[in-house]
Image (cartoon, rainbow, N blue to C red):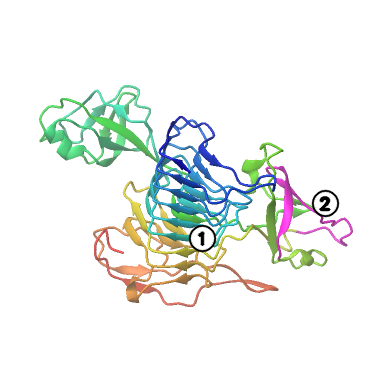
Amino acid sequence: IISGNNIIGAKQCGIDIEPSMLNKHIVEGALVTGNTIDCQSLGGRGIDAGGEACSFTDNIIKNPVSAGIFLPEHDSKSNNISGNSIIRSGKYGIWVPIKNYGSHLITNNIVNIAGRSGIYIQKGWNIVTNNIVKDAGTILGNLQDIQTATSANPCVITLNNHGLSVGDRVRLSGFSHADWKAKLNGVVSAISIVNDNQFSLTSIDTSGLPAFSGRGRIESVKGGSQNIGIQIVDQKKNIEALSRSNPMILTWTNHPFSEFVDEDPDDVRKFYVQFTGIKQADWVNLNYGYREVEIIDSTSLSVVGLNSSGFAAAYDAEVDPGKVNVDYAGHNMFGPNSLENTLGKMFTAINLGSSGYNDVYPQQYIGDYTYTIRNYLDTDYIRGTGKTTIMISNRTLKPEETGGIFTNRPDEEYVVSSDTTTTLPIALAPLEFTFISKNSN
């Protein structure tokens, strides 16, 4: 039982429940609850939630660089991740990585700002329900005290060496004067650069306010690299090259195991890939099943125990564009979650990837999105009733709109059978929608 600790400054992780890296032991039934961890953006993660049937509940994790809660590889399975608050993660709020047994309960957590995804799933069979993800895909700068502000249209802020760029936005807070506080606190505004020490707040009119006095603060709002609330990783890619050698070498530029290239060699991990869609003689026998690989570098993987040196012909990636994917990430149940986009950087609420067999209940979406649910397959079960069933939207919904059309999905590639690949649209008519309010489901 690890409870009630206050941990400040975590370079690798604040609390580490180690899984069975060398297959010699496993932690079972640990309870990690009621801890406060401030990683202070020094690096790493808040909690490494390894083990089996462990509970990680009611913890507060601030400022992790990679993830608030990370469920490590190998023997991490069937853990309870509930009631945690993760604030301002550099990449992910909760991360279920590639080589993981999955089958975790992830419920009633709050992820408030993550640079990439709020909940990031690379291994399936999880229950993800009643979580709140706010402003994934957003990176906030440090809070800075302004020197002064003008009573003008638009308002001009003076902040020496502000470091802002064209296209940035700012979030305003901490204004102490009553009139300025009522007008600006909590506002997110686009900006125009005046000079290195000044910028204007686009469309913010403060001409009716008294002269600025007291205090005011700003922090920059930038978009992250993925901008997704809940994400199942879509790792399926065209095969770049396969070698005729012993062992066979797979070329995959920036493959998903790249982050483990420089890890401690004593930290034993196993990684697997799956090949599909290959038609060329000899090579066709690689299809389906999972094959263990070892990392050579960020672009090359050797396939353990596979000798392709005797294959009759070299693999031709242009003529035979087979696919390679990582270990299976589907079969998740997404109960009702709340996806809130208040800073306008979370472009996709849920990305189901290409693994399939996910059961998605109606979610609550707050704010504007380019996509609500993206990349779902015909094996995913999207629950809903009538015209509120959630579909892909190819444009952002605005609060002043009164109606329109959802397109079901763009044309994408589907494997129709084991030996046929084609491109076709889902045969469904577009669904009408009626806009009720900005906060409606």
Amino acid at circle 1? Asn
User: Residue 238: image x %, image y %?
Assistant: 66, 58
Majority SS type along the magenta span:
loop
The local secondary structure at tag 1 comes to loop
Q: Is residue 66 above or below residue 26?
A: above
Q: Quadrant of residue 236?
A: bottom right
Where is residue 293? Give x, y as percent: 73, 51
Find residue 290 and report its image quarter. bottom right
- Residue 291 highlighted magenta (yes or no): yes
In the image: residue 67, left or right of residue 176 = right
Residue at 31% x, 23% y is 197
Q: Earlier along the polypeptide chain: callout 1 or callout 2? A: 1
Q: Report the residue at 85% width, 56% height from top.
A: 307
Q: Percent position (x, y) of residue 189?
A: 28, 40
| Quadrant housing the C terminus | bottom left
Q: Nearest the camera: 179 or 47? A: 47
Residue identified by numbered label 2: 247
Q: Which residue was labeled with disc 1?
A: 126
Vertical side of 277 occupied by 179: above or below: above
